Amino acid sequence: MKNSVWKMIYLARRNPTLAREQFPETWRSHSALGKQCKNVGQRVKAVAQCSRVLDDALPSTLSRDYDGVNLMVLADRDSGDAIWRDPETLAIMRPDEPRVFADYVRNFSMLCEQHVLRGDGEGAVYPQRDAVILIGFLQREPAFTMAQPVPASLPAPWSTGGLNAAHRIVCNTLDAPAPVGYEYGYIVEWWFDTVKAAQEAALALSDANEAFGDCVFMLTQVTHSRP
């Protein structure tokens, strides 16, 4: 029996008073507050702040509506619920959230189970600083019920064209009701060796849009991580 890997993933917009170039460092300063929260250290095994690559020449299939994706590996499934009730988190981190984001974090966070479709095994690999990850939020449906099947193999649209150059592909499935506006079926990570390779892969995303409907794709680079 496999050991499940649980993640809290959020799709963030920055506080509109921040310039887009200011967001990664401001986000990192918010994360540093977690050092004051003992329970956060116990419940969170790894964090990767994936900031949107800022290049106006990127393909139009890539979203400019969001600023970053947080990939947070949890100690267990229960941590995904308990973290929202933690007194230290509520007292220290939540009041700082409006400084960084356009809304409170809980309103754009999704609790997920990880499934590795290509690359090293479950949970053994965490994104490190400067890692390049193309992230897709797929199959948005107003009546989403979490009954999405885990792909038994890599779906063809997920490895079309340049997407097949990804050395690691991870599918995350939601395991709790999503906030309004974030009812995605799958959150998929394509890991690349270079930004150029990811840019080339983005050219194939029109096929994925046709296959999965209303999607959000972001080209990101990790600007802060731990461990």
Image: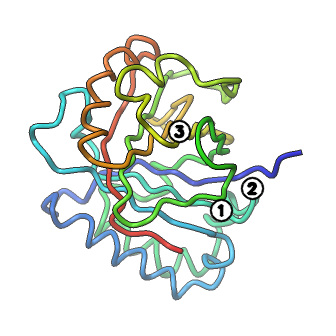
Residue hosting label 1? 74
Image quarter for residue 29? bottom left
Question: Mark 2, residues whose alpha carbon is within 10 Å: few (<14), some, or many (≥20)?
Answer: some
- The reply to whether callout 1 and callout 3 are in contact (CB within 8 Å) is no
Q: SS at mark 1?
A: strand
Q: Is residue 1 left or right of residue 77?
A: right
For the point 18% across and 67% down, the residue is 22
Image quarter for residue 37? bottom right
Residue 116, above or below 93 = above
Image quarter for residue 33? bottom left
Residue hosting label 3? 169
Amino acid type of the residue that numbered disc 1 sits on in the rendered structure: Leu
Expressed as whole percent of the image width and height from the top left, the position of residue 92 reads: 48, 81
Amino acid type of the residue that numbered disc 3 sits on in the rendered structure: Ile
Residue hosting label 2? 77
Expressed as whole percent of the image width and height from the top left, the position of residue 162 reads: 35, 27
